[in-house]
Image (spheres, rainbow, N blue to C red):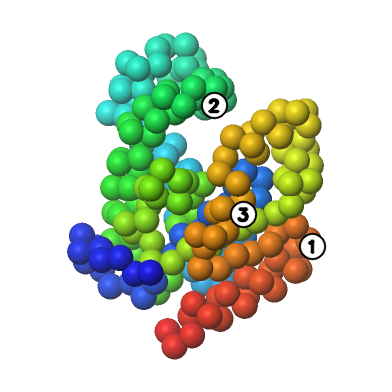
Amino acid sequence: MKPDCPQLTIPVVQIIGLTGNIASGKTTVAEMFEKLGAKIIDADSVARTVVEPHSPAWNEIRDKFGDEILNPDDTIDREKLGEIIFNDENKRDLLNDITHPRIVDEIKELIESNRKEVIIIEAALIVEKGGWLREIVESLIVVSASENSRIERLMSRNGYTREEALARINSQMPSAEKEKQGDYVIDNSGSPEATEEQANSIWEKITDGN
């Protein structure tokens, strides 16, 4: 699965996507690959950059969603905006239409300036809606975890009730469906050591011959 990327001029051995549903632990896994030598591009961090106050994307979001989604310092209140789009698919699609093209452009620039042989793009949405990063990634790692593990993480990390955690889990593509899209799957339900062992094994495969 190696789509053409003619717009990228810096030769990179591999550009790999890393995804997983909420509370699956994809950031933890990304850190493991970073220690192994990969360059990590965090799509969420890029998303924060493209919506900085008074940027073009910020102006569009403010126009479409109103001043009520702004903090006193004019930054976007991600929690408030998240509540709006969580309950309205049309508004979620509207936000994605504003942000995703700009995020992809920024990621491409980061790839162009990078000299690592392996780049891993960590992003929550790669396979959904036709795959908004599929034009960039050559292969895909999916991080999964049991539902109980994810519920416990959301309750501990975000302070959600069990019902709130389940609502967010159930709003996403089922993990089993996402795993079918992956070239590699990491089960992050167990110990950190077990997860790291899987990451090491995948790293050996993707760097074999590099």
Residue 112 placement, left or right of 40: left
Report the residue at 62% width, 70% height from top. Answer: 199
Q: Which residue is mark 1?
A: 191
Residue 123 placement, left or right of 191: left
Q: Which residue is mark 3?
A: 176
Report the residue at 51% width, 72% height from top. Answer: 37
Residue 86: image tag = 2
Q: Nearer the viewer, mark 3 or mark 1?
A: 3
Q: Residues within 10 Å of mark 2 (few under 14, many from 20)?
A: some
Residue 5: give x, y in percent of width and height.
Answer: 25, 63
Name the foreground residue: 196 vs 177. Answer: 177
Residue 52 visible to the viewer: no
CA separation, marks 3 and 1? Answer: 21 Å
Residue 64, placed above or below residue 36 = above
Name the amino acid, label 3: Ala
Q: Secondary structure at mark 3?
A: helix
Is the C terminus in the top left, top right, bottom left or bottom right quadrant?
bottom left
Q: Nearer the viewer, mark 2 or mark 1?
A: 2
CA separation, marks 2 and 1? Answer: 31 Å
Is the N terminus in the top left, top right, bottom left or bottom right quadrant?
bottom left
Name the amino acid, label 2: Phe
**Label total for image:** 3
Residue 114, placed above or below residue 45 = below
